[in-house]
Amino acid sequence: MQTVRMVVRLVLIVLMSIVLVTLRFLVWPTCFVSERADRHLRRILLQTWNRCFARIAGIRVVAEGPVPKPPFFMVANHLSYLDMLVLTHLTGCIYVARGDVEHWPVIGPLSKSMYVIFIDRQSRRDTVRVNKLISHAIEMGDAVGVFAESRISPGLDVEPFKSALIEPAVAAKLPVYYATLGYETLPGCPPASEIVSWWRPESFPYHLKRLLRHRGVIARARFGDEPLLGDDRKELAPRLHAAVRANFIPLK
């Protein structure tokens, strides 16, 4: 039964993705007319894909607290690649993703066309370039999400936030929204720490197939009641960390 469920879901996801890619290429000429309009269309397509993926994969996304509307800058904790699905599902935001994703087959080129921002985490100098791209995205009406731990955590706690990528918000005097992400599985399924968390050294296809074998997951995003402001990123980062951590429930 689990194998049949996984195969059916994979087929549906592939078909749905083909439709998304086709639609993306059909609206591509918009970028030559208006970048802002192209970004808006991209947001609609990406949010639609995420919502379809969630329905196919049995992921129920629950929002708690006021969900911000674009444009905005937001930080969140990082437990899995599903974090991006959850926040895009709710807000349509784009992300600062690790640089190697840019070179993944299919996903890399598609992510670039969706204005995802890539960063070389091995190079401190790349932060300057990325910060400019973040500022530009927000000026164009986009919402930008940053996983401020800078890596996926095991889900036992929220690791300290890196302050460097908060700099665009500080420099532009933007309020910083925040969200705390958490997951739980349905009765009869393995715990979320086994089928959602992706901090172990295992391939993406292997993890995805394991996730799709099971009935489903409940994903919760708890948004802060009010965004935080700061004039110093090194002072603001610990405050954001404390606010996210206050709502965090360790993965079981």
Image (cartoon, helix red, strand yellow):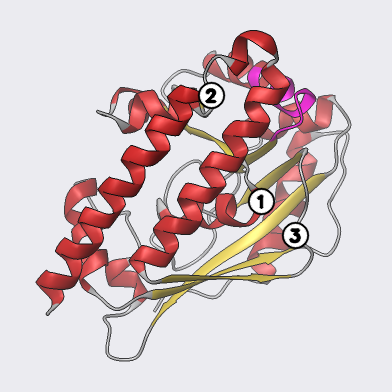
Residue 200 image point, x, y percent? 25, 54
Q: Report the predominant secondary structure element of the magenta stretch.
A: helix
Residue 9 image point, x, y percent? 25, 62
Residue 153 seen in this snapshot: no
Dot 2 or dot 1, earlier in sequence: 2
Residue 75 image point, x, y percent? 66, 47
Q: Which mark is residue 60?
A: none
Local packing at callout 1 (Cα closer than 10 Å; few below 14, some 14-19, many 20+) is many
Residue 207 image point, x, y percent? 23, 56
Residue pictured at 79% horizontal, 64% vertical:
66
Residue wearing tag 2: 27
Q: Is residue 19 above or below residue 118?
A: below
Which mark's residue is nearer the viewer, 2 or 1? 2
Residue pictured at 54% horizontal, 75% vertical:
249
Quick check: marks 1 and 3 in contact, CB under 8 Å?
yes
Quick check: marks 2 and 3 in contact, CB under 8 Å?
no
Q: Which mark is residue 91?
A: 1
Q: Is residue 138 left or right of residue 147?
A: right
Q: Amino acid at mark 2?
A: Val
Furthest residue toward front:
26
Q: Is residue 1 magenta?
A: no
Real-space Cα distance between discs 2 and 3?
A: 28 Å
Residue pictured at 19% horizontal, 64% vertical:
8
- The boundaries of the magenta stretch are 133-142
Dot 2 or dot 3, earlier in sequence: 2
Task: Classify mark 1: helix, strand or loop.
Answer: helix
Residue wearing tag 3: 67
Q: Quadrant of residue 189?
A: bottom left
